[in-house]
Amino acid sequence: MKVTYKNPGFKHSIDSIVLFLDDAPYWYDSLFFFFPQLRKEKLASFTQNQAKEYLSTELKSVWYDLNDEINRKVELYNNHFDKYHEQIEAAFSEAFEIDTRKIFNDVIGNICLNPISPRFLEERYFDVFYKNSEHGALGMSLHEMIHYIWFYVWNNHFGDSYSEYERPSLKWILSEMVVESIMNDERLASINPYYPREHGGCVYSYFQDMMIQEKPILDILNQMYRENHMTDYMEIAYEYCVKNEAAIRQHIAEAEC
């Protein structure tokens, strides 16, 4: 598996940001923290085309001031990833019980202005917020790479559809939580500045305090992972999530409001 970081240009940043404007504040509030010149009330009243025009006007000078820095980070991120490439592939191959050297060698990490950094499974690219250091960029990239391989193995095992893997489906929820189980490998944990939970965590914050029957759900999933082969883990973990779906969704809804 190989990630190549690129500067996709200004328009990509705007298109990426617009994807989240209709979501709960949990998802887009960081945009106003990093770009205080943007007005939340204005964006809330705009159509998508109006929002794009407004964002383009407000952020264009920001982009051009940052363009040289982003180009430098293209080289920095790529060099840092290459330094650990073999180590990452070895860890993922063991975790997923497949040879990851043969898959996903064309994934693109687009460095942009969007602090939310979405990923696109079938298109094989994800976004990286430009403020990341090379260490932070690698940490969040490990998170996204786990998604690509997880759903590759999942799809081959279950034979379902990639359309079922996006938020807010339960399959998406599970895929976000299991990142920590796989990141526990020292070969990955040692190069991820967001690991462990005490350093911010490598999964969304509302999973880190989610309790099911007075037990942290991440701890429950971690134990399942340690005790099972990958596809067995997928089956058992998903069955557990189905059984507790109401509690899981209630916790997420309360956290996102």
Image: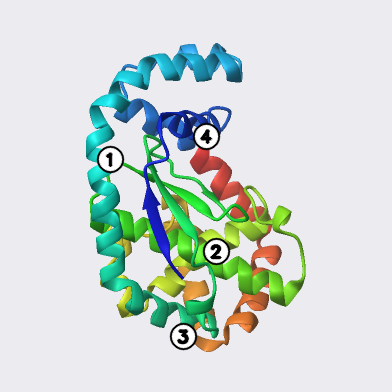
Marks 1 and 2 sit apart, C-alpha to C-alpha, by 25 Å
Q: Is residue 216 visible?
A: no
Tell me: 90 left or right of 232. Answer: left
Q: Position of residue 249 (x, y in %)?
A: 62, 50
Mark earlier in primary sequence (2, 4): 2
- Could you classify mark 3 by the number of other residues whose Cα lies within 10 Å: few (under 14), some (14-19), or many (20 or more)? some
Which residue in the structure is indicated by mark 1?
70
Question: In the image, which disc is placed on residue 94?
Answer: 3
Q: Relative to the observer, which residue lies in front, 13 or 21? A: 13
Mark in front: 1 vs 3: 1
Mark earlier in primary sequence (3, 4): 3
Mark in front: 2 vs 4: 2
**What amino acid type is highlighted by mark number 4?**
Cys
Asked if marks 2 and 4 touch (Cβ < 8 Å), the reply is no
Mark earlier in primary sequence (1, 3): 1
Tell me: 182 left or right of 201. Answer: right
Residue 243 higher or lower than 41, as above or below = below
Marks 1 and 3 sit apart, C-alpha to C-alpha, by 34 Å
Tell me: 141 left or right of 174. Answer: left
Mark in front: 3 vs 4: 3
Asked if marks 1 and 3 touch (Cβ < 8 Å), the reply is no
The quarter of the picture where residue 76 lies is bottom left
Q: Position of residue 218 (x, y in %)?
A: 47, 67
- Could you classify mark 2 by the number of other residues whose Cα lies within 10 Å: few (under 14), some (14-19), or many (20 or more)? many
* Secondary structure of residue under mark 1: helix
Which residue in the structure is indicated by mark 4?
257
Q: Position of residue 53 (x, y in %)?
A: 50, 15
**Residue at point 47%, 34% (across, down):** 12
**Residue at point 66%, 62% (across, down):** 244
Residue 141 higher or lower than 44, as above or below = below
Question: In the image, which disc is placed on residue 148?
Answer: 2
